[in-house]
Image (cartoon, rainbow, N blue to C red):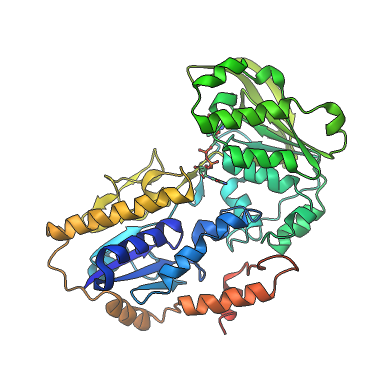
């Protein structure tokens, strides 16, 4: 019997479990650990609440979770409740599927002003992550600045722009919906340090901005390169740029009906945040871009900002004694191998890039490496205790494990508490989640 411990129950974790099952069939036992009492990581607390079709992928993870040889071990924090060396003594392989839950710091003067947030916190807030449920952003001002030109910036800007009706079928949590209901935002400026050809936003997500009830996207035609220059772009980016061109072509008469302007400010690199105690403006430096690289021109200007959300990428959490690549913000690894018996997948392996589906080949890849290492004798003679050994340790430490069956009860309670039309109302604190299992 092979014993695999996976730390993290998001997409990378479940795809790895699925791959282990396909590889070893009944000869493997997989335990998936999560700090939260609820599974699915990024699917639950990262993917935007108005993107329910993307969240639907969790049904695939459930199919894996419900098999005999895979189990969910929720409400257990590796590093506190059980150490990595302890897991290594019990399982043949330990796989970090811990994602990249921390913001890349902006590192600018004024980034500690009130009402300045990183996207991990802000997205966690509207998605009901227990760590960020109490964030309480102030949406009473007229101007928001969203820094970054990736899909997370787009998610944040879109959520800030939507009306209550547009959230009808979403699982946005009640505290965020209440706050957005009282929002006075009139301008949301998405700031990018490079130009249209360097945006990281994907076409489907950009296209959604054309259909917002009360917001209209705006691109300055002067920021757009000659049409012919788009020919060299790969097809996805070319489509995204086509959307920017259509935003630039929206007639003023059409904008007049919309209360919120979603302004793309490109070639603008933030240099500092201004304000007394709360943020009031973002100072940016105009840039030029040569061969894809931005350089400052020395010309600066300020953009009014009562709220700032920095969406400039994420970092993984280092774990004591596990080699970490500080610069890249992920585990130091060679195709998923960290040290003998220690592996990583997903964002913990390659950094915060790609779609949810990108994690599937990652999961299958790491299982191949584990199989190779087992065959080569790198992982020792086998015969480890696996989950039986962990159960004994958990009992000795009085760990309150939340199982997948418990999660199904929590899920049912969330579905029952949903607003009309919504799929669920999430519990946003850990105690409430645990109580809901009955
Ligand atoms: P991202 O795609 O890497 O975008 C980060 C953005 O931040 C880039 O525009 C980058 O500009 C900018 N940036 C970085 N450092 C900066 C700085 N110091 N100052 C100003 N701007 C800075 O990251 P993300 O948006 O966090 O997304 C992470 C991953 O999740 C991506 O693969 C994304 O596609 C995926 N995702 C997908 C969806 C979806 O499919 N619906 C939704 C959300 C996220 P430069 O390019 O100039 O560095």
Residue 30 quadrant: bottom left
Quarter of the C terminus within the rendering: bottom right
Name the residue: 66% across, 66% down: 423
Q: Is residue 361 above or below residue 401?
A: above
Name the residue: 55% across, 38% down: 312
Name the residue: 71% across, 60% down: 169
Name the residue: 75% across, 58% down: 177
Location of residue 419 in the rendering, given as x and y in whole percent from the top left corner: 74, 68
Residue 260 quadrant: top right
Location of residue 433 in the rendering, given as x and y in whole percent from the top left corner: 58, 74
Quarter of the N terminus within the rendering: bottom left
Is residue 21 found left or right of 151 in the rendered image?
A: left
Q: Is residue 253 above or below residue 334?
A: above
Is residue 256 found left or right of 318 in the rendered image?
A: right
Location of residue 252 in the rendering, given as x and y in whole percent from the top left corner: 84, 27
Q: Between 275 and 5, which is closer to the camera in this rendering?
A: 5
Q: Look at the image and tell me whether residue 200 can be seen.
A: yes
Q: Between 212 and 118, which is closer to the camera in this rendering?
A: 212
Residue 210 quadrant: top right
Q: Between 278 and 148, which is closer to the camera in this rendering?
A: 148
Q: Is residue 414 above or below residue 210?
A: below
């Amino acid at each position: 019997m092979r014993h695999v411990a996976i730390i993290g129950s998001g997409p990378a974790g479940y795809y790895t479990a699925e791959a282990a099952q396909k590889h070893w069939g009944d000869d493997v036992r997989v335990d998936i650990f999560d700090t939260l009492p609820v599974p699915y990581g990024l699917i639950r607390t990262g993917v935007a609440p108005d993107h329910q079709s993307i969240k639907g992928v969790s049904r695939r993870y459930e199919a894996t979770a419900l098999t005999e040889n895979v189990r969910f071990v929720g409400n257990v924090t590796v590093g506190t409740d059980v150490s990595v060396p302890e897991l290594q003594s019990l399982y043949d392989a330990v796989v970090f599927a811990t994602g990249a839950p921390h913001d890349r710091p902006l590192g600018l003067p004024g980034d500690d002003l009130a009402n300045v947030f990183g996207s991990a916190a802000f997205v966690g807030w509207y998605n009901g992550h227990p760590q960020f449920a109490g964030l309480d952003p102030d949406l009473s001002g007229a101007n928001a600045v969203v820094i970054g030109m990736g899909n997370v910036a787009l998610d944040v800007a879109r959520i800030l722009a939507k009306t209550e009706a547009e959230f009808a079928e979403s699982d946005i949590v009640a505290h965020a919906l209440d706050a957005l209901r009282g929002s006075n935002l009139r301008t949301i400026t998405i700031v990018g340090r490079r130009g249209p050809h360097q945006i990281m936003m994907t076409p489907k997500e950009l296209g959604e901005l054309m259909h917002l009830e009360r917001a209209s996207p705006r691109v300055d035609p002067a920021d757009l390169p000659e049409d012919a220059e788009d020919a060299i772009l790969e097809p996805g980016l070319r489509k995204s740029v086509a959307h920017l061109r259509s935003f630039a072509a929206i007639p003023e008469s059409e904008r007049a009906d919309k209360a919120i302007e979603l302004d793309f400010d490109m070639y603008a690199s933030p240099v500092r945040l201004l304000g007394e105690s709360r943020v009031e403006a973002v100072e940016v430096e105009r840039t030029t871009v040569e061969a894809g690289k931005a350089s400052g021109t020395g010309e600066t200007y300020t953009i009014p900002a009562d709220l700032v959300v920095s969406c400039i990428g994420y970092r993984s959490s280092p774990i004591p004694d596990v080699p970490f690549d500080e610069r890249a913000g992920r585990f130091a690894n060679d195709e998923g191998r960290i040290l003998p018996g220690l592996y990583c997948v997903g964002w913990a392996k390659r950094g915060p890039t790609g779609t949810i589906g990108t994690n599937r080949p990652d999961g299958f890849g790491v299982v191949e490496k584990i199989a190779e290492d087992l065959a080569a004798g790198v992982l020792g003679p086998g015969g480890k205790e696996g989950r039986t050994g962990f159960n004994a340790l958990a009992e000795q430490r009085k760990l309150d494990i939340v199982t997948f069956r418990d999660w199904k009860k929590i899920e049912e309670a969330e579905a029952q508490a949903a607003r009309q039309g919504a799929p669920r109302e999430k519990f946003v604190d850990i105690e409430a989640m645990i109580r809901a299992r009955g």
